[in-house]
Amino acid sequence: MSWYWQPGNIRDIVADFPVEDKSNGMKTARLILAKPALEDVTTYFEIYGDIRTNLYNPFGPVPDITAAKANMRKFTTHWEQYGFGPWKISLESKPEEIIGYGGLSHKMYGDVDRINVGYRFAESAWGKGYATEFCKAAIQYGFEELNFPEIYAVVRPVNLASIKVLEKSDMVLNGELDDVPGQVKSLVYYIRKADPYAL
């Protein structure tokens, strides 16, 4: 089964964000998405090193600040190499406070390189619809601005909250991925950009 995203106006979701290069950031109704910097590593570690945000992560929390710095370098390197990548996420009402990280990136699904949408929010940001708002905007940005034909997401089958976010973002189950040795397979969701000439 395929699910198609219908082209619309990205400004329905995304407003101009005052940065030097607008490809580095944007706004949604309530969120500011901005290109991260290595200086954001402390907040990154607070979120990714929290056991509560890793309940369904079989690899567990980021263990220390050294590992956090290495992961942040992967974020910034992805931006340098491809011109897009994970954003740091803050509230428009509190732009100085980072509540999560997420975005589009290249990710290997087995031996296949996919465009993946992923995110992680601080526990204080749960249950407020931010993840769905973010995911919809990231997908729309990927289709309208980056012209990707498909976008994928991978999720553990017990992570019902994230599954609900993906489904609210019009992504559909596409298969399974054996990405955690010795454990149940992860679920693969995806969404495909509609052919603008299709009836």
Image: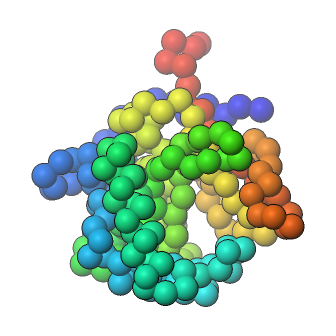
Give the vertical position of 187 relative to 83 (above or below): below
- Residue at image x 51%, y 12%? 197
With 56 as the anchor, is 75 left or right in this view? left
- 75 or 29, nearer to the observer: 75
With 191 as the anchor, is 175 left or right in this view? right
Give the vertical position of 173 relative to 6 (above or below): below
- Residue at image x 49%, y 18%? 196
- 87 or 75, nearer to the observer: 75
- Residue at image x 50%, y 54%? 135
- 160 or 84, nearer to the observer: 84
Q: Quadrant of residue 19?
A: bottom left
The location of residue 159, given as percent across then percent down, is 72, 69
The location of residue 62, given as percent across then percent down, is 54, 80
Q: Let me know if residue 123 appears in the view.
A: no
- Residue at image x 57%, y 34%? 150
With 193 as the anchor, is 40 left or right in this view? left
Give the vertical position of 103 relative to 194 (above or below): below
**Which quadrant: the C terminus?**
top right
**Which quadrant: the N terminus?**
top right
The location of residue 117, given as percent across then percent down, is 53, 52
